[in-house]
Each structure stands twice: as C-alpha cells, then as structure tokens.
Amino acid sequence: MLSNIYHTILVSPLLNLLVFFYNLLWSDIGLAIIAVTVLVRLILYPSFKHQLESQKKLSELQPQLQELRKKHKDDKEAQSKAMMDFYKNNKVNPFGSCLPMLIQLVILFALYRVFLTGLNGEILNQLYSFVPNPGEINPVSLGFINLAESSLVLAVITGIAQFFQSKLMTKFTPKSVKNGKDAGGMMTNMMSTQFVYIFPVITVVIGMRLPSGLVIYWLITTLFAVGQQYFIMRGKSKTANQ
C-alpha cells in the first residue's frame, strides 16, 4: 500500500513531468532532466534558504553551546534540557536543516524508480491525459551521452561539484567556531573537515554505479545549490557587516 502511495504522489508525477519536458525540449532526455531539476530547486528554494540560515545561525551559536556543555558536563540530563531551552529561546531547530536534504533524497529515489522501470513500454501508459505519449524515449542526450548507462566522468564531475559546495559552506563558518580550542570545538572542526573530503568521494563511488540520468540530476542539484548558497550566505554576511 505504501509503495502504491509513493508511486502515485511522487514516481508518477515525476514521470509525467519528465515526459512533458522531453516532448517540449527537442526529445532530449538530458535537457528534460535538467528542466525537472531546476523546477524542483525553485520550488524548494524557500526551504533551502531556511536551511542555510539555520546552519549559519547554529554555527554562530556554537561558542555559547560549548559553554553550556562545559557548565553541565557532569549532568547529561541537565545538559540536554539546557541545550533544548537554548535552541527554543534562539528560535533554532537543530534538525530543521535535514528536511530539504531528505526531500532531495526522496525525489532522487523516485527518479531511480522511473529509470529502473524503464522509460519505454508500459510505463508510458501511466501518462496523464494531457501529456502526449512520445511512443519511446531516446536515452541518448546531446547525441552522445547514454543516460541509461553509468558514467565515471559524470560521477567525478559531480564529486568535484559536491566538494566545492561543502568547501563553500565552511567559508561562511564564523571564525569563533573555526578557532575553537576546546574539545567540542576541535571535534566540530575535525568533523567539518572530514565531511568536506569524504562526502565527495562517497558521491563518486555511488554515482559511478547509477544511471547517468540520475547523476545529471545530482550534478545540477549540487550546482544550483552552490549558486543559491553563495548568494544567500553572501547577502547575510553583507547585512551582518553593515
């Protein structure tokens, strides 16, 4: 039952959107995937902006959080309560930044289902009445990239884009957090550094096993995020310095 609900509310709409853009954009599945990705990113922009603002605010509050941890280091229950009260008073949700990422993963899995099932044959019978059936979908984009097959080159490019996104996030981390000398601050810095290098590697390893169509979605999502991240965070930094 859950599978049917997931198919109805995500897989089927994404399939129809993909075919709609495929018909519109010269029957190029690569361009259709890019169009779907851009549309999804625009829809999720308010949520993504809130995520970045929450991350930045959490970074700025780290010195005060470290003081709370020190103050209640011998009483974990009191420490947890003090931290939750601190989050509440500062109107910050430590888990709020996870939502946009989860939404992106859900969409990625839905697209994976579309590619796994295949874009030809019976699946095209699931199109809405207002979406013309193209008969078959050519998996080759731009005349030479087969998006039904995996591509090491695309996976590596996506990993590089992921590295720049992670690196950009650390650029906007407050100096008070970067220069933290206590154990908590050092641990946070170490984990941030590891994330910058490890996550791109994971991206390449996973991406080289996926159909290139999914990697294109991942790549465009990351590039779009880099642009949004830069302008949002730069705007916040300018405002803070005025």
Image (cartoon, rainbow, N blue to C red):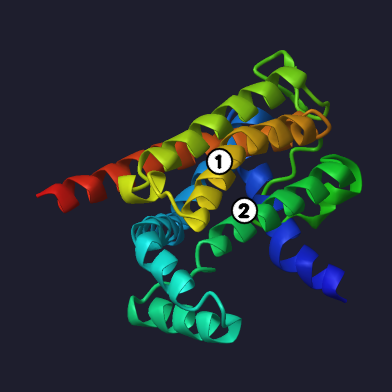
As displayed, is residue 70 above or below residue 124? below
As displayed, is residue 231 above or below residue 65? above
Where residue 173 appears, as percent x and y from the top left, is: 37, 46
Q: Is residue 195 left or right of 69 when viewed as pictured?
A: right
Kindly indicate the quadrant of the structure image that contains residue 110. bottom right
Q: Is residue 181 at all visible to an observer of this figure?
A: yes
Kind of residue at badge 2: Gln
Kind of residue at badge 1: Thr
Residue at 61 percent across and 59 percent down: it is 103
Lower position in the chain sequence, tag 1 or tag 2: 2
Residue at 51 percent across and 38 percent down: it is 166
Q: Name the residue under label 1.
A: 221
Where residue 151 appears, as percent x and y from the top left, is: 77, 22
Q: Which quadrant: the N terminus?
A: bottom right
Q: In what element is the residue under mark 2? A: helix
Mark 2, other Cα within 10 Å: few <14 / some 14–19 / many ≥20:
some
- Residues at badges 1 and 2 in contact (C-beta under 8 Å)? yes
- Residue furthest out toward the front: 74
Where residue 9 appears, as percent x and y from the top left, is: 70, 67
Residue at 34 percent across and 82 percent down: it is 89
Q: Name the residue under label 2.
A: 104
Q: In what element is the residue under mark 1? A: helix
* Cα separation between marks 1 and 2: 9 Å
Q: Looking at the image, which is closer to me, 101 or 59?
A: 59
Q: Is residue 217 at all visible to an observer of this figure?
A: no
Kindly indicate the quadrant of the structure image that contains residue 148. top right
Where residue 211 appears, as percent x and y from the top left, is: 80, 33
Q: Looking at the image, which is closer to me, 192 or 229?
A: 192
